[in-house]
Every structure is written in structure tokens, then in C-alpha cells.
Amino acid sequence: MGLIKPFAMGGRVELAKTNWPGVAHYLEGSTLLLIPVGSVEQHGPNGLIGTDHLVAEALARRVGEEEGILVAPTLAYGMSHHHLAFPGSTSLSPRTLILVVNDLLSNFYRNGFRRFFFVNGHGGNDSSLKAAFSEFLLDHPEGRTSLANWWLLPEVVEKEKEFFGKVNGYHATCGEVSVTWHLFPDHETPIAPGQAPDPHHEWPLGPDRFRSLYPDGRMGSDPSLSTAGKGAVLFDLATRVIRERVREFGSAP
Ligand code: NI
């Protein structure tokens, strides 16, 4: 029996690092699963390609640790068609993302999970995630789904406005760059001051059109204002708000 290490609350929260008896034990007390989702796409000349999935993963793991909730392996790839004119970016198509998410939910459901809370780091995933939830809920009446887009949480929006004003921008934002500098200080890459072009209110965009409107990949942001200290504040704030939402979701009838 020495090989079986049941899941212990308040420590091992990664599904990938537990085992099936541990998960079975967990399911006796909770059917809640956190699922981080992001993208693999350019984030301007100084932002990390993995920004969206790395931040979502860090947030989900922090909340999972604090609340004793299992965290599924991160769905790192997302719907990033508009970024494909930049090297290092790749994408699932919207329909593929819907199918992948529906498959994951349906098969976790088969094993006993019922409540799925997605921590999302990427705007391009939002509509496909919600479409996947609609598909899943049709056939799984006891299933429950919820989604937190961390950068759109009202508390985070307000704090970013206070920190960066209008030049926070819409992609490769001061806020998300700050959070990655907080999480990965070895990857802090400064950038010369200057605001990227403002959005043209044309959406969605194909990859070539995107690059012609936003030549260096940023949308309206001036990430020279980013600091790891501000990133720490934003990360803690997002953690607190998501934790509250997870608690509410987990205890709802
Ligand atoms: Ni991003």
C-alpha cells in the first residue's frame, strides 16, 4: 500500500500529481475542479508568449492551495487566430476549442466531477468556452460551469485604471505584463515608453489585418509602466476575488 498516497487537503492540489485513489477520496468530499485555460500567442515585443496560460495557471493553483480544491492540468492552447501573423503564436480554431472543452468536461463528469470553474487568461477563448458550456450542460443536467476572466474582474479593472490609466490598453496590457514580471522575475524585459495604437473598434480580425493595425502586437498599451510590484498587487487582488467566486460556486445548491 506504500505506493498509494491519498490526496491531502491544503497541499497537493494538482490533479497531475495525485493518483486515482486520491481523486476518489477527494470526490467523496467535493466534486469541484478548477481548470486554468489560456493561450500561446504573442504579447507585444516584451511580453511572454505564454502570458495568458501562465497567469491563469498561477491563479488557479493559488486558489486551489488556499481552498483545498483540485486543479486540472492547464489547457495552455486557446483561440488566437488574430495573433497568427507573429512568430511563436499558435491556435486552436473556435470549433476545436469547443470540442476539446466539451470532451474534457464530459469525461471528468463520467468519473464524478460535477462543478467546473474555469480560470481564463485570454479574451479570445471567452465565446468558445461559453459555447462549450452550453453544449455540455444540455446533456449533463447535474453539471455546473463557471468562468472567471481574471483581467475583466471589476476589482482588477479598477486597480489597473488606477495604476495605468488609459494606456493599460487591450492586449499585452501593462497589467498582464506586470503580473508575469511578478511571477517570473527572471523574465522581466523592459520596453521603451510609448503607447501602441488604440483599437480601431473592428473585431474580430484576421491575422494579417491585426498585424497591419497593431504592428508590434500591442493594442493601446504602454507596458513601460509595468512593474513587478504592481503585478503582485494585481495578482493578490485577482486571487481574492476568484477565491470568493469559487466559494460561492462550490457552495451553491
Ligand atoms: Ni494576454
Image (cartoon, helix red, strand yellow):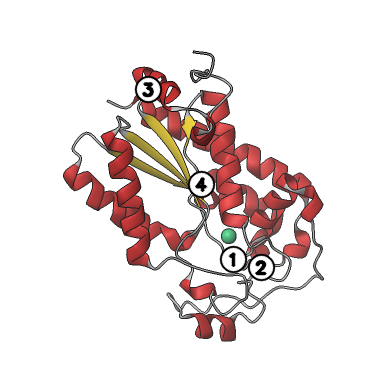
Q: Secondary structure at mark 3?
A: helix
Q: Residue at x 47, y 76 (%)?
A: 201
**Rendering coords of residue 10 (x, y %):** 56, 20
Mark 4, other Cα within 10 Å: few <14 / some 14–19 / many ≥20: some
Mark 1 touches mark 4? (CB < 8 Å): no
Q: Which mark, residue 74?
A: 4
Mark 2–mark 1 Cα distance, whole angstroms, equals 7 Å
Q: Image check: 46 left or right of 51?
A: right
Mark whose residue sits in front, 2 or 4: 4
Looking at the image, is mark 3 or mark 4 earlier in the sequence? 3
Q: CA distance from mark 1 to mark 4?
A: 21 Å
Task: Residue 226 in the image: state x and y as whole percent.
Answer: 75, 57
| Mark 1 or 3, nearer chain start | 3
Secondary structure under badge 4?
loop
- Element carrying mark 1: loop
Does residue 167 appear to the left or right of 100 in the view shown? right
Q: Is mark 1 within 8 Å of ligand 1?
A: yes
Earlier-in-chain disc, 2 versus 1: 1
As measured in the structure, the alpha-carbon distance from the residue carrying label 1 to the one carrying label 3 is 41 Å
Which residue is found at the position 31% from the left and 57% from the top? 99
Instruction: Determine which residue is flagged by label 1.
Output: 171
Label of residue 221 in the image: 2
Say which amino acid is labelled 4. Thr
Vertical side of 82 occupied by 224: above or below:
above
Write down which quadrant ligand 1 falls in: bottom right
Q: Secondary structure at mark 2?
A: loop
Amino acid on which disc 3 is placed? Ala
Q: Are marks 3 and 4 in contact (CB under 8 Å)?
A: no
| Disc 3 target residue | 24
